[in-house]
Amino acid sequence: MQGKKKPSVLRQIFILGGTALVIGIAVATVSVGSNALAERAENAPAPELALLTSVAVSPIQFESHYTTTRRFLGQIEATAGAVLSFELGGHLAELNVDEGETVAKGDVIARLDTALLEAEQTRMIASRGATTAQLTFADTRLKRAEQLQGDGFSSQETLDQARATRDELASRIAEIEAGIATVAINIEKSVIRAPFDGRAGAVDVEVAETVNAGQMVLTLIETAPPLLRVGIPLSVAKDDLELVTIEVAGEQYAAKLQQLRPDIDPTTRTRTALFALQTEAELAFGQTANLMVETDVAAHGTWVSLDALQQGSGSIWTVLVVEDDIVRTAAVEVLYQQSDRAFVQGSFTEGTQLIHTGAHRVVPGQQVQVLQGGV
């Protein structure tokens, strides 16, 4: 039993010795590598310092007011429009205008057949001539009767009868004259003339038709500069409406207030205003348009771009400013906002350097390089 234990002890001694040798070799290798790395690190050049972030700033300049632009939807309409018709019925002999055609004031648009009226006029003129001849003879008889009665050769009755005959014929001529004037008026009313310069709208009849009194022949739309009809809230002052801008299909036109009605629409609670557009452009009547009203609001603040605004805690907005090359936070109150900028009041003084753009690239407390001339 003792002879078997001796080889086991020797084997353990060999194993321990081999392990110690391996560990020694590893320690020596690590030591040599560490010395080499340390020497290489000492010989390497020192790293350059990181460059500061550049930000564009501009000094804050306060203003005493800002201008708001309010929009109201309205409709383009003609200055004047009329539905034209005959006061008398009859056979339509002429129609000189087609839909969309331009006419000048006084142009003949349509005419009825007036043959019967003209014949009646001729008959009455002839009747007037015959009655006038009778009146001349009656005047002669009256003068003779007056002379005879003065000489005592004629009775008073004969004189009265001659005078009555003369008066009756004079009245008949007056009646005929009135009839002739009526026929002339009817002939004139058988013609439709353009009441103003305009363009024809819908035409509702054809030549050779028989039209009734009051039946629509066509509509006429005045070609003068169009109007905008729009409802204005009571909060808008009349002085702000004197000169405004109208936007139609992306185009803007100057306009002037023409009328502001004193009554209030019971449904919309607005007052109707009419604006004359100062343009020669042909606009479609019935087209919608935007009325843009500018109003000055007194307030002490400054304009900042929307890029400069950042959402703070809660409902507070902030901007970033630079003080001694260090980024700081300033709380602001937004008073008015446009498409690309806002008018604000804030916890800063005039002349403070404001970061207008690129505020997302820096954080409060960061040191930066300032570039003057922000947008």
Image: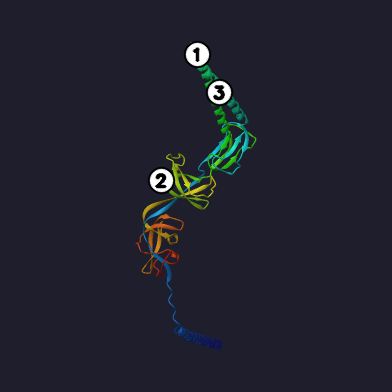
The residue carrying pointer 1 sits among few (fewer than 14), some (14 to 19) or many (20 or more) residues within 10 Å by Cα, namely: some
Q: Nearer the viewer, mark 2 or mark 1?
A: 1
Residue designated by label 3: 132
Q: Where is residue 360 in the image (x, y as percent from the top left)?
A: 45, 65
Q: Which mark is residue 148?
A: 1
Q: Is residue 189 above or below residue 254?
A: above
Tell whether label 2 touches label 3 (CB within 8 Å). no
Q: Distance between the residues labelled 2 and 1?
A: 84 Å
Q: Position of residue 281 (x, y in %)?
A: 53, 50
| Residue nearest the viewer, comparing 136 with 125 | 136
Q: Judging from the image, what secondary structure is the residue with disc 2 in?
A: helix
Label 2 or label 1, whichever comes before in sequence order: 1
Label 3 or label 2, whichever comes before in sequence order: 3
Q: Position of residue 303 (x, y in %)?
A: 40, 59
Q: What residue type is labelled 1?
A: Leu
Q: What residue type is labelled 2?
A: Lys
Residue designated by label 2: 238
The residue carrying pointer 2 sits among few (fewer than 14), some (14 to 19) or many (20 or more) residues within 10 Å by Cα, namely: few
